[in-house]
Amino acid sequence: MDQRTIQLPKNPNLVKALLYARVSSKEQEKEGFSIPAQCKLLRDYALQNQFAIAQEYIDIETAKASGRTNFSEMVKYLRKHPGVRVILVEKTDRLYRNLKDWVTLDELNVEIHLAKEGVVLSRDSRSSEKFMHGIKVLMAKNYIDNLSEEARKGQMEKAEQGIWPTKAPLGYVNVVAKDGKKVIEPDPVLAPIVVKLFERYATGQYSLKALTKAAHADGLVYPKSGNLVPVSTTHAILRNRLYSGLFQWNGKLHRGKHEPLVSIELWERVQGVLTGRNATPIHSGGKEFAFTGLMTCTECNCAVVAEIKKGKYVYYHCTGHTDKGRGGYADCRRKYVREEVLDQTFAALLDALHFDEEVLDWVREALKASHADEKREHEQALHRCQTEYKRIEDRLNAMYLDKLDGRIDNAFYDRMSTQWRVEQTRLLRKIERHGEAQESYMDDGIRLLELARNASQLFARQPAHEKKRLLNLVLSNCGWTRGEVQAVFRQPFDLLAETLASAAAQQAGRANVSAEHPIWLGNLDSNQD
């Protein structure tokens, strides 16, 4: 990471600008997406277009989440210096990859020059340019997901072997087994406390708050910080099937090889208490409810569950296991909502993703045209990997001849050949990953847009389990506030919804998309050709 102050030229006619360059990892920097190459391109651009670079901001780290160090410093500088409102950057995916960064820059009313794309974006830009820019950000996010598929595959393989593939939950610790695999085993300090949590709650005599207080007395804290765990963490522990020896990964149930802390019978008894003594269990009588497991109460952080009334009517309500209100239950538990009402609510949310067929056709053609630069870069990356692979292969062949001629001993040959074979394996994985990402980039992007466009229609005609699956794919962080549902779209659907909302707002003659985030992504107009 780097931040550089530049000596400004004395020419008063030059407009001050900020330079921003980024590579997503040290490895990517080595592959040719270099900071020096970006900086040279942008300095030449500044010289040709009469800009004086006031500051240079450089990041070498992942951009999958917002919060990059020097991106944040650049935002601070823009807020302190209202006279500087121009950012020079190589192209879209170098500047931001998520809606939060986008909104941040939009609020500052900056003019963004994408030097390699030949595009200048500001509030005065044509709405068609803004719309395409929004789609490019969406596609950039989708492309990151394609490149990270390798890591997800590795986690899935571990899960299928019965190995918990990520950070150990409270009560377990991550260790390296004798065979070299990373596994989890009971934490000698916290595991007994977690067992007590299940045993106490199964009696039905504890509220979640009282249970958490008792666990604090036993010593239930976060190992690293030493902070006491909140009620929400207690609830998450009791809901986590991992403690019974089973776990879910990517929607599939796996039998773990780790040592369970509680029996399956105890875990299921605890779920019954959490669901509520008078409520019909979630899968009672083979009935599967569409919206269980999707929402959490915003007031008490408990789960929202379904209950059948009069043998046929499905109602949803908060479990409300806290110390508030009468009988040890929170007031939020008193609100019941019919399933049909929630069905209409979620259908309306998915309507926000719908757009016309002609828009899809236009975006499809525009994406094909704009993808040429990205495709060329990936072809170059593939070529570099293939060249390096051949160079190592030539070294191995030459070293083998040296071994036969007695110039090197067997020990040296074995050591170096092992080292180079490992490097070749790494290169093969990268070649495969780049190839798959390049092939699927456009197809996956179009499929993603088609899914979003048809989400509401798909939802209306699907059975309960498919409705839940669709909502889990598109939505995240669904909150329940006394019967009212608040939902957030997952990336990149959040970006698409904002883009379409902005288009609709401008079409209706409104200046702002919302009071909070007036995003300027534009609608299609007579300039779109």
Image: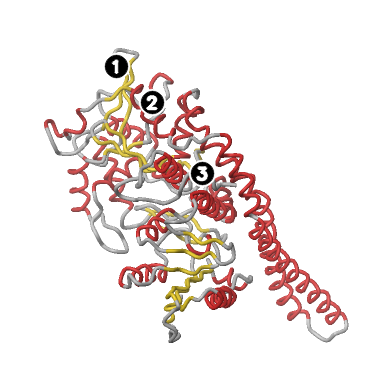
On screen, residue 49 above or below 177: below
Q: Residues within 10 Å of mark 1 (few under 14, many from 20)?
A: few
* Label 3 Cα crowd, 10 Å radius (few <14 / some 14-19 / many 20+): few
**Foreground: disc 3 or disc 1:** 3
Residue drawn at x 27%, y 38% as measured from the top left: 297
The foreground one among 392 and 347 is 347
Report the front residue among 293 and 214.
293
Q: CA distance from mark 1 to mark 2?
A: 18 Å
> What x and y, as percent, mark residue 240?
37, 42
- Which tag, 3 or 1, sits closer to the chain's start? 1
Q: Amino acid at mark 3?
A: Asp
What residue does disc 1 label? 309
Kind of element beneath mark 1: strand
Q: Is residue 162 left or right of residue 386?
A: left
| Residue type beneath disc 2 | Asp
Secondary-structure class at tag 2: helix
Mark 2: give few (<14), some (14-19) or many (20+) Cα within 10 Å.
some
Relative image position of residue 187 (x, y in whole percent): 36, 56
Q: Quadrant of residue 148?
A: bottom right
Q: Which sits in the foreground, 224 or 454? A: 454
Above or below, 503 against 342 in this view is below
Q: How many numbered badges does the structure rendering display?
A: 3
**Residue where numbered disc 2 is placed:** 343
Name the residue nearer the viewer: 288 or 110.
110
Q: Is residue 394 above or below residue 116?
A: below
> At which x and y percent is residue 221?
26, 57
Residue hosting label 3: 525
